[in-house]
Image (spheres, coloured by chain):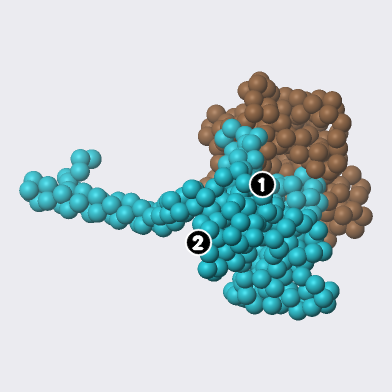
Chain colours: A brown, B cyan
Amino acid sequence: MGVDIRVENLNAWYGNTHTLQDINLHIPSNHATALIGPSGCGKSTFVRCLNRMHETNPIARAEGSVLMGGLDIYKDATPVEIRRRVGMVFQRPNPFPTMSIYDNVASGLKLNGFRNKRMLDEVVERSLKQAALWEEVKDDLRKKSGASISGGQQQRLCIARALAVDPEVLLMDEPASALDPVSTAKIEDLIFQLKTQYTIVIVTHNMQQAARVAANTGFFLNGKLVEFGATTTIFTNPHDKRTEDYITGRFG
Amino acid sequence: MKLGTRFPRSATMHRLHELRRSAMNHFVTGLAVFSTVLVLVPLVAILGYLIYKGASSLNLAFFTHVPAPVGDPGGGMANAIVGSGVILGLASLIGIPVGIAAGVYLAEYGRGRILGNLVRFTADVLNGVPAIVMGIAVYALIVAKQHHFSGFAGGVALAIMMIPTVSRTTEEMLATVPHAIREAALGLGIPKWRTILSISLRTASPGIITGCMLAFARVAGETAPLLFTAFGNQFWSFDLNQPIAALPLQIYVYAVSPYDEWHRLAWAGALVLIVMIMGAVTLVRIFANRGALQGGH
């Protein structure tokens, strides 16, 4: 089951650039939450702060608190522990090219020392079914490289890989922006089904996509969270003039 | 859009332009083919000449017998073949792990650090140290301290020569592993050391294996570092604590001797050495490609 995320006074920097400024918001559990905003507004930095990937860049740092189900991920846990509980799907599909489809899905467990073969088989099948990829790859699980399938399939493979470690939160950084419309529709269907079991945070440039999958939407601009609320409100009756300008296409 | 419709141009001019373009294309392709042939000529020539000079002296005794005294017919280089194998095995056992570990440090931890730059600089300098100097250095460090020549000292000398090549190729190959793949691993909660070991090194392994093979092939033919270390002998010995025979040493001794019979054996030894190196490299390639997946690298 998913957990809720409470972000308090989160600030982030790349070198001297203040990319996130005093972010406060509450992301409810077991819902999909969309983050929209123009390029460079900080929404990617924000999700990367939620699994402490932000700090893998040597010049990056973050301050503030992120409470995941009550646990302060910056104080009470190591980055490795947090990333095992928070799955991440990136903009471009990034399967491990030297691994088979099976090993890609099993990698999170195997490389953390999990060796029970029967259990691994079960997890791989369950995760691939959850990612709606099982039927397409079940005959080539160990024969084909994770990089040999199509881009849309690769992205679903990456989702299966993230789900295999049984996370509570799933972060998706523009997961469909490199895919064709058919593959995009499949990913959106997936988000729709997965949000009942996981807390999903999805960054997107596509406002229709936000409207289709997310219960709540946040609008970022220049490192600040301008507005956060129910998706229908944000899109039909935004409180802030800047949100309205953005969603009506007046800038960005 | 049809070609040539963008600018008003007569049919003859268009034809002329096409002819020039096509001629240039043929010229450059020809140049590339010529260069390839130029690269292959020395290899084929050397191998051909070795077969011509050496193959006739090859027989079973060459691979099963130790050297015979001057004047005695027959005799072989069995001890030198085995000795080379032992020394190279030891050199690889030391040089490859140390080289790869140093390469990992340079690529994953030492970026922009003083120690990293120092290690990189040292490796580059070490790569340029003449082989004979390496022999003298190991002589002073090991042989002089122990008061006797040894196969171990020979292995160490060759290992030190392998390290710079192995570490620099490891560093360069790790740098070609896409950042996205590391992020995928870190994002799964896989610790950094595990990510390096199971993801980065594995993705870079074809290039790293090539680097190891280059280093191996280079030191396999080295004579100078062994002159003051392994020293060579004329009898069976597997003791790493004693002087040990090696093919390059044996070839050197035989080639500078005044005896025709030994000259012929030196040619045969050279042929065996080059075939052994090619065989080892091919075997590793086949072994490394086994179990490759469809559509991977």
Residue found at x 72% / y 66%: B230
User: Against B141, is A246 above or below?
Assistant: above
For the residues marked 2 and 1, what is the alpha-carbon distance in whole angstroms? 21 Å
Q: Position of residue A25 (x, y in %)?
A: 79, 51
Q: Position of residue A71 (x, y in %)?
A: 91, 49
Q: Earlier in the sequence, mark 2 or mark 1?
A: 1
Q: Position of residue B213 (x, y in %)?
A: 61, 54
Residue found at x 65% / y 35%: B291
Look at label 2 and name its amino acid.
Answer: Asp
Comparing B166 with B41, the one in front is B41
Image-based side of B7 in relation to A36, left or right: left
Crowding at mark 2 (Cα within 10 Å: few <14, some 14-19, many 20+): few
Look at label 1 and name its amino acid.
Answer: Thr
Q: Secondary structure at mark 1?
A: helix
Closer mark to the observer between disc 2 and disc 1:
2
Q: Secondary structure at mark 2?
A: helix
User: Against B196, is B164 above or below?
Assistant: below
Question: Mark 2 — on which chain does it sit?
Answer: B
Residue identified by numbered label 2: B260
Crowding at mark 1 (Cα within 10 Å: few <14, some 14-19, many 20+): some
Label of residue B74 in the image? none
Residue found at x 53% / y 58%: B261
Residue found at x 17% / y 53%: B20
Say which quadrant the N terminus of chain A sits in: top right
Label of residue B64 in the image? 1
